Amino acid sequence: MMRKLATTAMLAMAVSSLIWTQPVFSAAAPTVVRKVLMQQDVPNGAQLAVVSVEIPVGGREGRHTHTGPLIVYVQEGALTLDYEGKPTVTYKVGDTFFVEAGKIHEGINRGTVPIKAIATFVTEKGKPLTTQAQ
């Protein structure tokens, strides 16, 4: 009985050491913070939203889309934009950029300071501002 218990314990330790030596992909990434500053219904069943976005050093939004166009103004830091069908570009303080409706894109902070930006959306009323890409 004791030998069986010892063998089980050794097997459990061996398996756990294998698990812990593998890369861990579920570690929490730095959290992107979005805060809706204003949301307003506009003509033609659309909605306008102004959102502050903060991406910490090493943070990324995840690939996503919007149901309408997006305009972003970079206030602090350098925002690297991966954009479907276009070259990756880094935008610095004072830069603005436009994202077309339905295009998969992702903002990434590869810099050394947090990013602060203002994002303005025009989306279909009742639809989410952001939808994660598959």
Image (tube, helix red, strand yellow):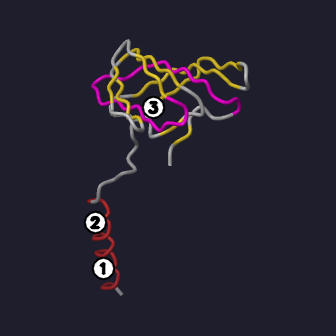
In percent of width and height, residue 122 lies at: 61, 24
Residue position for label 2: 18
Q: Which residue is drawn at 41% across and 14% down?
A: 75
Q: Which of marks 3 and 2 is in front?
A: 3
| Observer-nearest of 26 and 53 | 53
Could you tell me which residue is drawn at 27 percent across and 25 percent down?
112
Task: Identify the residue under disc 1.
Answer: 6
Q: Do the residues labelled 1 and 3 touch (CB within 8 Å)?
A: no
Q: Please, which residue is most extreme toward the bottom here?
A: 1
Q: Where is residue 78 in the image (x, y as percent from the top left)?
A: 33, 22
* Image quadrant where one finds the N terminus: bottom left
- Which is more foreground, mark 1 or mark 3? 3
Marks 1 and 3, how far apart at CA: 47 Å
Q: Give the range drawn in magenta.
A: 100-126
Badge 1 density bin: few <14, some 14–19, many ≥20, Cα 10 Å: few
Packing grade of label 2 (10 A; few <14, some 14-19, many >=20) is: few
Indicate left or right for 88 with 54 as reference: left
Residue annotated with mark 3:
32
Q: What element carries label 3?
A: loop
Quarter occupied by residue 114:
top left
Observer-side mark, 1 or 2, equals: 2
Point out the tag, 3 or 2, that comes first from the N-terminus: 2
Disc 1 to disc 2, how far (Cα)? 19 Å
